[in-house]
């Protein structure tokens, strides 16, 4: 049977069983796809989800400014058309004064929220290696990077609104209490209004104990373990690549508050911000698709500071 005939027959059956009062020819208005022999009407699925929002307003964030000198990584200009906030590299895993200045200026021009993205001092390894540092060294390194970005933000008449640890530091603060306290105290002492972006874990707990707001991040293209931590990049399947799977995962995470872990078990997650990566082929297109699908599903987008402010008022 040809595709159009299959859709028409399916639409007639849908009308009969669900009393949908619409012309059978209106199926052309829907973005119809076929999956394993089934006819899928995305708009109908989205409309049913609108009744079940966990967070009707969220932030979209990307890691930006991650070039160095003459080298660039990702398309920051394109991503800045999509995101509402930016995690900006502060020179330790990527970034330099010129890149930091330019990235902050573009964020200000476009109304994108500014966040610090500190890491271990691992420029050669892109911040993805454990440096064996003490908690005191971690705290000083975070203060150094946060101070640098704050300088550029002040120059452009704004401030750093959030902090999101990068790479291996970001992994370890979720499970190491000493690192978590070091980062949380650094953020709190610099600005007690600082928002800490984290997964549920040690950093989230330490930041709340320090009196800071915590924004839970959903990392949509990474596999999760059942304890809420990420599957290590050294393991197969740690990074997801199928755009359709990533989009569906994002919608479910934001709207239903559920996330399928690598072992097949669903975990509950209440995200405030969704992290979009832009440093691989097709990433910008995927980020744009995620934004479009969220809006189509009735989700509002805003910079992280606005999301958290609204959340506080609603509490």
Image: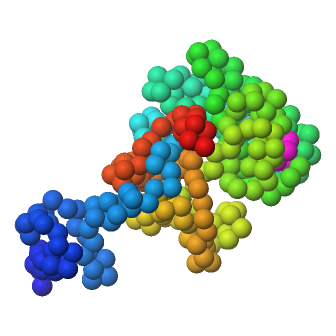
Q: Is residue 111 above or below residue 315?
A: above
Horizontally, is 193 left or right of 60 in the view? right
- Residue 97 location in percent, x, y? 66, 24
- Is residue 198 in sight in this rendering? yes
> Bounds of the magenta span?
179-183
Secondary structure mainly formed by the magenta segment: helix
In this rendering, position of residue 207 left or right of residue 280: right
Q: Up-down: is 121 above or below 221?
A: above
Horizontal and vertical percent for residue 42? Answer: 29, 64
Q: Residue at x 80, y 58 (%)?
A: 175
What colour scheme does the image use? rainbow
Q: Residue at x 47, y 45 (%)?
A: 57
Residue 9 placed where, x, y %? 12, 80
Nearest the camera: 44 or 153? 44
Q: Residue at x 68, y 54 (%)?
A: 199
Give the residue drawn at x 67%, y 37%.
195
Residue 91 placement: quadrant: top right
- Residue 233 occupies which quadrant of the picture? bottom right
Residue 70 position (above or below residue 151): below
């Amino acid at each position: 049977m040809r595709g159009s005939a299959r859709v028409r027959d399916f639409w007639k059956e849908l009308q009969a069983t669900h009393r949908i009062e619409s012309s059978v020819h209106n199926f052309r208005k829907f973005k119809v796809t076929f999956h394993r022999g089934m006819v899928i009407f995305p708009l109908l699925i989205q409309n049913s989800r609108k009744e079940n929002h966990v967070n009707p307003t969220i932030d979209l964030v990307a890691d930006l400014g991650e070039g160095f000198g003459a080298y660039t990584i990702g398309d920051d200009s394109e991503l800045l058309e999509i995101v509402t906030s930016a995690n900006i590299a502060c020179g330790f895993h990527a970034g330099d004064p010129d890149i930091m200045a330019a990235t902050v200026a573009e964020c200000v021009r476009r109304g994108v929220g500014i966040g610090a993205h500190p890491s271990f001092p691992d420029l050669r390894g892109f911040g993805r290696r454990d440096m064996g540092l003490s908690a005191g060294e971690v705290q000083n390194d975070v203060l150094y990077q946060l101070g640098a970005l704050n300088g550029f933000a002040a120059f452009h008449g704004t401030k750093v609104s959030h902090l999101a640890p990068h790479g291996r530091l970001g992994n370890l603060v979720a499970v190491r209490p000493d690192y978590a306290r070091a980062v949380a105290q650094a953020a709190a002492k610099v600005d007690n209004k600082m928002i800490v972006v984290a997964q549920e874990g040690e950093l989230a707990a330490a930041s709340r104990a320090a009196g800071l707001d915590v924004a839970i991040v959903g990392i949509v293209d990474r596999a999760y373990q059942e304890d809420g931590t990420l599957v290590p990049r050294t393991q197969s399947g740690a990074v997801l690549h199928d755009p359709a799977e990533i989009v569906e995962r994002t919608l479910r995470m934001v709207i239903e508050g559920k996330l399928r872990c690598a072992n097949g078990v669903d975990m509950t997650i209440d995200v405030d911000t969704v992290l979009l990566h832009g440093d691989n082929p097709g990433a910008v297109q995927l980020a744009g698709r995620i934004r479009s699908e969220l809006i189509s599903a009735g989700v509002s987008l805003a910079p992280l500071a606005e999301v958290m402010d609204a959340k506080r008022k609603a509490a």
